[in-house]
Image (tube, rainbow, N blue to C red):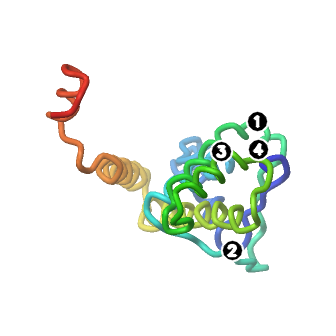
Amino acid sequence: MFDKQYRFTGTHAKMVKELTSGFDESGKLKLFKRNLDVYINAPIIGFINKRKGQKNTDNDIADVSILGDQLIGESSNLEYVFRLILLLDEEYEPDKTKRLDKAFRYFGKEESENDLKLFDEYVLGGVEIFHEKLIQSSSSSSDYIAHLYDFIDDFNELTNRGIESKDIVSLCVNGKQT
């Protein structure tokens, strides 16, 4: 599944180039080191934010690729993310048993084209979110850093909503929530 080259095309290729380019004067500071890093993290961000993107092939923009060898090297991480999405996306598959089967019993044996398309849509949606939140309104190194801080803060709030400090302390002290 994650054993051959992946290509970002059109505007998504442009966005990935900008996400992996240096943003300081020396060009050494980057939000993401590699295209692969964007690819690993984007579906998580797309899923959490319920954002799916649609592939486009604007011929004026050069494609951006991730080599198959790189994907193979990170296949366990990518499969983990893919399984989580299959397991948690109740809108895509409302039946809990079918979600469990897709994520565990049949995973790696019979992924449907729709499952792979779903993953890719979340990848593209995540790329769009990264670009909007981190790149679009940045014009200086300090802007990039401020937007990254805000993005991480928003992500933390989004993923930890409903959990309060007292709940964490209670779990640590008692081993259960009160």
Q: Would you say 170 lies left or right of 46 here?
A: left
Answer yes or no: do the residues labelled 4 and 2 have beta carbons within 8 Å? no
Q: Earlier in the sequence, mark 1 or mark 2?
A: 2
Q: Residues within 10 Å of mark 3 (few under 14, many from 20)?
A: some
**What residue is shown with label 1?**
73
**What residue is shown with label 2?**
55
Give the amino acid at mark 3: Phe
Is residue 164 positioned above or below 46 on the image?
A: above
Give the amino acid at mark 4: Leu
Secondary structure of residue under mark 4:
helix
**Residue that extends furthest to the front in the rendered view of this protein:** 97
**What residue is shown with label 4?**
71
Real-space Cα distance between discs 1 and 4? Answer: 5 Å
Task: Give the number of the mark in front: 3 or 4.
Answer: 3
Is residue 144 positioned above or below 128 on the image?
A: above
Residue 56 at x, y percent in the picture:
70, 77
Secondary structure of residue under mark 2:
loop
Real-space Cα distance between discs 3 and 4? Answer: 21 Å
Real-space Cα distance between discs 1 and 3? Answer: 21 Å
Q: What's the residue at 65%, 73% (across, down)?
A: 11
Residue in the foreground of this view, choosing between 110 and 38 = 110
Answer yes or no: do the residues labelled 1 and 2 have beta carbons within 8 Å? no
Q: How many marks?
A: 4
Q: Quadrant of the C terminus?
A: top left
Answer yes or no: do the residues labelled 1 and 4 have beta carbons within 8 Å? yes
**What residue is shown with label 3?**
104
Secondary structure of residue under mark 1:
helix
Residue 164 at x, y percent in the picture:
18, 41
